[in-house]
Image (cartoon, coloured by chain):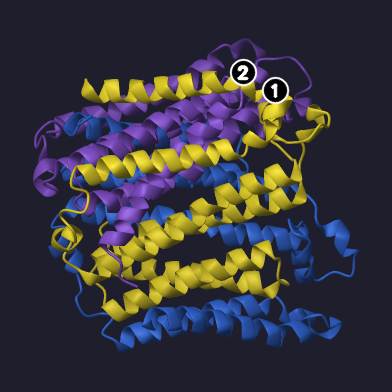
Chain colours: A yellow, B purple, C blue
Amino acid sequence: MDAFLHCTAGCVSLAEFQISLTAPWNKPSSKPVRHILPSCWLVFVIGAIQRRSFGKGYSAGMAELTHMIDSEVFLAFSTYATIVILKMILMSPVTSYFRLTRKAFANQEDTSLALSHEDHKKLVRVDPDVERVRRCHQNDLENIVPFVVIGLLYALTGPDLSSALLHFRVFVGSRLCHTVAYLLPLPQPSRALAWTTGLAATGSMACRVLRTSLYL
Amino acid sequence: MDAFLHCTAGCVSLAEFQISLTAPWNKPSSKPVRHILPSCWLVFVIGAIQRRSFGKGYSAGMAELTHMIDSEVFLAFSTYATIVILKMILMSPVTSYFRLTRKAFANQEDTSLALSHEDHKKLVRVDPDVERVRRCHQNDLENIVPFVVIGLLYALTGPDLSSALLHFRVFVGSRLCHTVAYLLPLPQPSRALAWTTGLAATGSMACRVLRTSLYL
Amino acid sequence: MDAFLHCTAGCVSLAEFQISLTAPWNKPSSKPVRHILPSCWLVFVIGAIQRRSFGKGYSAGMAELTHMIDSEVFLAFSTYATIVILKMILMSPVTSYFRLTRKAFANQEDTSLALSHEDHKKLVRVDPDVERVRRCHQNDLENIVPFVVIGLLYALTGPDLSSALLHFRVFVGSRLCHTVAYLLPLPQPSRALAWTTGLAATGSMACRVLRTSLYL
């Protein structure tokens, strides 16, 4: 019941916030405010969460992960998986940034976020730079998600620490190279090689999982 | 060997079922049957699985998760992750529904599912409503999958129960708001704020994971 | 610090390799070499990783997964999840293959990989076969990722071994049927039924997770 109230309160506060914004939002004078608001909201939400967390003993129970899954390999997996997932999440704001600066939106209602006086119907269009970032994001999804799943199972098979670190580092390095090669863009063999390296690391871990624990 | 037989049996039964359907399928008189069949199949498969499961002591061993990972935080994660993943899965049937009602298909062979007498070649087309649902599904994939991965690692770092619940509830609430705001659609700041809130919750959990278990 | 050096070394070697390739790459005489290079790289990387792994006691600690999570259900989950994720990863090379043979690329810089003397600007185009493979890959992402997440939680609830195996086998079988039905393509009811079967297996597991461990 508490949970339900919690969720409802969040929704209601969001809706209220939005209603209070809608009116001044459409006034031409308030336009510079627009891009500041989402970032203010982000700072406010992170702040609120962290404040409540700290107030309730956030930093207590440090390193309990070490007791729970008592393994350096798992700690390493946890670190590299978080890094590579954060890299993937970062593609979303990059897409938003390109959509706002290139003025190429996917939905009619989004065009109100543009700071231009052009005809808003023309802003629902496809832009090559936005599409490039989206393809990069899609490729991340198709490669990083399998890595995380297989990496978790691999970490549980109890591999040697140094070979586990090698796999994780090769994968994370190859994905960073891939993103750089896709967004700049670098001439072609580079991106294909980065992609193949990542795939090889995932495939090698999958081999190990299947050899250790084949149970059909 | 048993596993192989099991899989083959499943494939063969699917194929037989399909062959038995193909002939009457193309008769104009059997058209109203078409939309009923997939749902019958769904009910039949769930029924068969549950019947076998119950027969083999399905409800025995209740709450063994509590013994396995003895932590309320993990139970909470498990519940919220399942809810948010089910919400994501639900976008697939919604897409199918819009494809069938708007008569906008992606593949030539799918047009035989339409209940119309129009030229079937024209039904392979892009519809704005279908594309809106697909973008919403894609955005779910890009946000919910990172949440699940980072949430799992976060639950293993042994956080305070109340702050873990706060993170999970804020994320699930923000995704529900996001879907409503995308599909209705609501005017713009609402969707951007819901998206930012979800991102903030994931980011805050990632901070905690990296601070607890940094092992490069 | 060691980790940082490791990553940098990887990036530098990739960059050097690429620079050494760029010059002969654009000569018409070296064209047959192009398609061999990425596969050589794949073999080289897998070989290097496996050699270092073996050198450091790769096959030691066999079956430590069994001690870590002492459960046949978890072993079964690990096997089936790896198989189905490998199937999903395989769609990436299939897409590349179709892009190269159909000469339909997504980026301007990729056209240098084509073995043709046509105008390279015309090769940035949409091909129906490539789009079919990509839709199949996208559908895999939308269905296999939820299966893996819910399957992991399901395996931790301590279900009966036979019913767990039934769920995993039905899902993996249905996804293999789905891919075959999508790529050939088979006439329509087959793909819809395979998709519904997979959804039903995931839904049945989600029911079990929510009934065992509801903690809102």
Label 1 residue SS: loop
Label 2 residue SS: helix
Residue B183 can be seen, yes or no:
yes
Point out residue A58 in the picture as x, y percentages from the top left corner: 22, 49
Left or right: A191, with C152 as reference point: right
Point out residue B4 in the picture as x, y percentages from the top left corner: 33, 52
Q: Quadrant of the N terminus of chain B?
A: bottom left
Please tell me the numbered disc located at residue A23.
2
Badge 2 local density, few (<14 within 10 Å), some, or many (20+)?
few
Left or right: A90, with C96 as reference point: left
Task: Please say if A116 is above or below A137.
Answer: above
* Mark 2 and mark 1: Cα distance apart in space: 8 Å
Q: Quadrant of the C terminus of chain B?
A: bottom left
Q: Residue at x 56, y 85 (%)?
A: C13
Task: Please say if B166 is above or below A70.
Answer: above
Label 2 and label 1 in one chain? yes
| The quadrant where residue B186 appears | top right
Residue C133 can be seen, yes or no:
no
The amino acid beneath tag 1 is: Lys
Point out residue B79 in the picture as x, y percentages from the top left corner: 26, 35
Query: Chain for mark 1?
Result: A
Q: Residue at x 63, y 34 (%)?
A: A33
Task: Please say if B139 is above or below B191.
Answer: below
Where does label 1 land, which residue? A27
Q: Are marks 2 and 1 in contact (CB under 8 Å)?
A: yes
Left or right: B216, with C103 as reference point: left
Please tell me the numbered disc located at residue A179.
none
The amino acid beneath tag 2 is: Ala
